[in-house]
Image: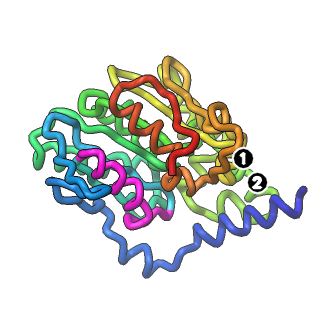
Amino acid sequence: MLLRKIITVSCVVAALLVPATAAQAATPTGSATPTGSATTAGRTVTATASANPVIVVGGLIGVSIAYEPIAARLRADGRRVWIYQLPGLGVGDIRDSARALSSYVDQVRAATGATKVDLVTHSEGGLVSRWYVKFLGGADRVAHYVSLGTPQQGTYVANILNVVGLGSCAGIVACQQMSIGSSFLTDLNDGDETPGAVRWTTVRTWQDELVRPVDNAVLADGATNVLVQGWCPLRVVGHLGLVLDGTTYTVVRQALADAAIRPDCFAL
């Protein structure tokens, strides 16, 4: 069991230690997707002007292109979509990433004339977005928040780096902040975890390799918390797979539409 954990942690560290040139080549302010229409299954779906713009907020080491699959699904449903890549690929202070997200949200609102946006977030991106909503005025600018595999209460995968002799998350600030019991998470989760009139939804999966324990991906205070296997026991979805999985996307679609959550277990 210990060997298995060490192998898992080694993979995580390898992913974290991306060459600096790759991080510098990324666009820290995200990338905008043109509005208009999308073609799906031979038919054209016109973007719904009345629907809130959707910003897909990436996670740690999450380059924009990794979120194109879920962005494409949203566009096919008629949504106007932007992908926000975390500054420096998210290795720095999550609070700094939240401040950058605040500016980005204002840019999207100005470009579209929308009062509010919807946030579909993955992994660390969910924490960045929550900090923005709770402390930086986002509660008045966000209508829906959906997190996919976000360590809302931290993850012991971050803590275990100490055990295998790599120090405190190998010096990576965001990893330290995602450790169970960090001062960052204490501040974020103090009081109301779901402030404002935002509609809060979380999605988690039993096969998440990076958010352990899995139930640390849930929120209290009125959030809708969806366990993929609670509806679809045979569905196998990993941490990264949450942004690719068809069943997971049906939850995203329903949450953004304020519909009852009934995941489609056979969605591709």
User: Which segment is the magenta one?
Assistant: 61-79
Quarter of the picture holding the N terminus: bottom right
SS at mark 1?
helix
Q: Which residue does the numbered mark 1 point to in the structure image?
A: 156
- Disc 1 to disc 2, how far (Cα)? 6 Å
Name the amino acid, label 1. Answer: Tyr
User: Which numbered marker is on residue 160?
Assistant: 2
Q: Say which of 120 and 102 sits in front.
A: 120
Can residue 127 be seen in the rendering of this structure? no
Pinpoint residue 197: horizontal percent, then vertical percent. Answer: 33, 20
Pinpoint residue 139: horizontal percent, then vertical percent. Answer: 31, 28
Q: Is residue 55 left or right of residue 47?
A: right
Circles 1 and 2: CB atoms closer than 8 Å? yes
Whether residue 65 is situated above or below residue 93 in the rendered picture: below
Pinpoint residue 266: horizontal percent, then vertical percent. Answer: 56, 44
User: Which numbered marker is on residue 261?
Assistant: none
74 within the magenta span: yes
- Quadrant in which residue 86 is drawn: bottom left
